[in-house]
Image (spheres, grey):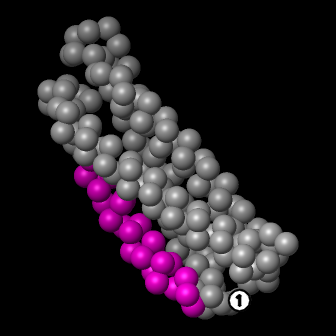
């Protein structure tokens, strides 16, 4: 079902606001990762493990809900229909959703072992998590760029 320009503009604004919120969550996750994990038995170890788990669950939950909303509301399909030159990018972004979530789920399992003290402080784990965060940021930046161009250039809201 085609949306009116006002409905589409409202949806795009909502998605851009969600992208800003996700950027904040990603930044908080990066800041958290910069701090070393206290060794098992040291003061703060259990709080660190709990905070790390909470941070990753919050990131995953936010991404999951955000991606599902993008996929279910139909606005991307509407944009692709109205502006065929955007169709390939829309499809690419939708395909990336499940891969990003799967990679984050895999890392969450590894981080749970790491944060519980069952695995030593492993720089490879931090690099893998940093890579996933970079990919999520690139994905969201690309989606934001696409939506802003559609909103301001194609829909004419920037006039």
Q: Which residue is mark 1?
A: 2
Quadrant containing the N terminus is: bottom right
Is residue 118 placed above or below 97 in the rendered structure?
Answer: above
Q: 48 or 80, which lies in front? A: 80
Horizontal side of 17 relative to 67 (left or right) equals: right
x%, y% of residue 3? 74, 84
Quadrant containing the C terminus is: bottom right
Could you tell me which residue is drawn at 80 percent across and 69 percent down?
Answer: 158
User: Is residue 5 visible to us here?
Assistant: yes
Is residue 80 placed above or below 14 in the rendered structure?
Answer: below
Horizontal side of 119 relative to 63 (left or right) equals: left
- Dot 1: what SS? loop
Horizontal side of 53 relative to 11 (left or right) equals: left
x%, y% of residue 42? 26, 9
> Residue reaching furthest top?
43
Could you tell me which residue is drawn at 43 percent across and 37 percent down?
Answer: 29
- 123 is within the stretch colored magenta: no
What is the number of callouts on the image? 1
Horizontal side of 40 relative to 53 (left or right) equals: left
Q: 23 or 120, which lies in front? A: 23
Could you tell me which residue is drawn at 32 percent across and 8 percent down?
Answer: 43
Is residue 123 placed above or below 37 in the rendered structure?
Answer: below
- 92 is within the stretch colored magenta: yes
Could you tell me which residue is drawn at 33 percent across and 43 percent down?
Answer: 130
Q: Of helix, strand and loop, which mostly describes the magenta segment?
A: helix
What is the quadrant of residue 70 in the picture?
bottom right
User: Is residue 74 visible to us here?
Assistant: no
x%, y% of residue 143? 54, 66
Sort mark 1 into few (<14), some (14-19) or many (20+) by Cα contacts within 10 Å. Answer: few
The span picked out in magenta is: 84-108
């Amino acid at each position: 079902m085609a949306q009116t320009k006002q409905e589409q503009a409202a949806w795009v604004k909502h998605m851009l606001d969600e992208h800003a919120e996700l950027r904040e969550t990603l930044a908080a996750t990066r800041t958290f990762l910069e701090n070393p994990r206290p060794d098992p038995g040291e003061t703060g170890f259990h709080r660190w493990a709990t905070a790390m788990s909470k941070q990753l669950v919050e990131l995953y939950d936010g991404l999951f809900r955000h991606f599902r909303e993008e996929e279910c509301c139909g606005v991307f399909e509407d944009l692709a229909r109205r502006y065929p030159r955007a169709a390939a990018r829309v499809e690419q972004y939708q395909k990336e959703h499940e891969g990003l979530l799967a990679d984050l789920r895999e890392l969450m399992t590894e981080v749970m072992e790491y944060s519980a003290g069952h695995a030593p402080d492993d720089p490879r784990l931090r690099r893998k998590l940093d890579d996933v965060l970079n990919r999520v940021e690139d994905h969201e930046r690309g989606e934001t760029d696409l939506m802003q161009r559609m909103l301001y250039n194609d829909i004419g809201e920037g006039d």
